[in-house]
Amino acid sequence: MIRHDVAIVGGGCVGLSVAKHLAARTNLDVAVLEKEYHLAAHQSGRNSGVLHPGFNYPPDSEKARFATEGTRRMKEYCAAHDVPCEERGVLVVAQTDREAAHLETLAERAEANGVEYELLDSRDEIREHEPHAVGRAALHAPEAASVDSQQYVYALTREIQRAGVSLYTGHAVSRVERTDDGYRLATSNSDVEASYLVNAAGLHADTLAHQVGVGESYQVVPFRGEYYELTPERADLCRTMIYPTPDPDLPFLGVHYTRRTDGKVIVGPNAVLAFGREAYDNTDVDPAELVETLRYEGFRKLLASKTMLSAAWEELNKSYRKRKFTEASQRLVPEVRGGDLTESYAGIRAQLVSDEGELVEDPLFIEREDAVHILNAVSPGLTSSLPFGDHIAKTLAANV
């Protein structure tokens, strides 16, 4: 049976970052167990690829600290490892008086978090940045960047392997059990034993944690985010990134435009309940996982909110009716037409929900003497991955 000092379950950007920093901080024998044979197959590779500089998060919060530090460190890392990363800036556009007032809040947060910004008070100023965008006011944050998230994951992989970390792909962990001297992990390939455990299993982190009695008052509810992309002839409708002003009552950013490092402009995502933790198509259904979600008390309490129920219906319409998705896109860029949008890809967000029906919006990890369970590495997870992984590694190293 294979044995290591530390087993990290999950080879996404967070799990690999933990491995990178553990290898730098300690002499422990570290292994990463990834269920897929190809990396970045799930959340780490199916996202917008945006580095969020931290203007949207409350000052002194973990999100703000990880986002601001993460943006800086990610840019440095990408430059050092030849990962495509382009600082394009983001334009956050307000359409209503309420949204314009919220821009002031974002500006205050940007100021407190040390994030560069500029408030734009007219349509003409908006069009200087994005000629095809429409709104009554906007906030421009020039430090936002676009990164190739898949290449970033592979760069981390190469680095940890050079540092002596063992990487096992095709090892889907199905069971975690406590032993007298640590943990035994049953996988689809072979069993692995370890003295210490880091659960960075993303969409399946809660399932593994529950097997050892951790985090039982929370459950992951999967939300699918679907993307379209502008046809090449219409890609000039967006120069950089165009976002709507976020609704403070909802955890999702809304449909937005992102020019990626490969020059494509993606539009989205929506945020619709996925009928399975890896149900990437709106026709995919995992009956057992869907029933698990629908039976979960926290999910039923979440939908008891009229605000959430209304948002859920709206997002569902965007998934099954392209016209509704197009209409959402036109709020920011009225010139876009349905024919300008082609289906691209989808990702699934592992949204943690409490038994009380509350969306967990901050990073959540639960420590044990010989384990760390990362239950919520919610957006901006990619942006935060380097400082967050460093923090987890430091936490575990302190217990060794």
Image (spheres, rainbow, N blue to C red):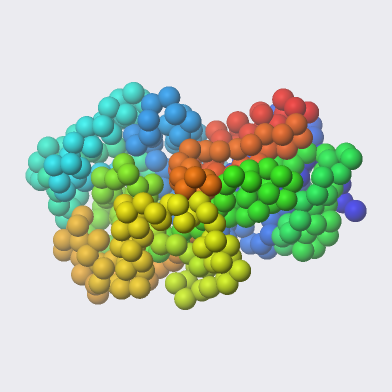
Can residue 71 be seen in this snapshot?
A: yes
On the picture, is 127 further left or further right than 293? left
**Occupied quadrant, residue 342:** bottom left
On the picture, is 69 further left or further right than 137? right
The residue positioned 83% from the left and 40% from the top of the image is 182
The residue positioned 76% from the left and 56% from the top of the image is 175
Disc count in the image?
0
The residue positioned 56% from the left and 38% from the top of the image is 364
Can residue 91 be seen in this snapshot?
A: no
Relative height, residue 239 to residue 60 (above, below): below
Relative height, residue 224 to residue 102 (above, below): below
Q: Quadrant of the C terminus?
A: top right
Q: Position of residue 128 (x, y in %)?
A: 15, 45
**Occupied quadrant, residue 59:** top left
Relative height, residue 399 to residue 200 (above, below): above
Q: Position of residue 172 (x, y in %)?
A: 72, 60
The residue positioned 78% from the left and 38% from the top of the image is 196
Q: Which of 170 and 181 lies nearest the eye of the viewer?
A: 181
On the picture, is 386 further left or further right than 164? left
Q: Position of residue 5 (x, y in %)?
A: 82, 39
Q: Which of 228 and 154 lies nearest the eye of the viewer?
A: 228
Q: Position of residue 345 (x, y in %)?
A: 44, 66
On the picture, is 137 further left or further right than 251? left
Q: Which of 188 and 24 lies nearest the eye of the viewer?
A: 188
**Occupied quadrant, residue 234:** bottom left
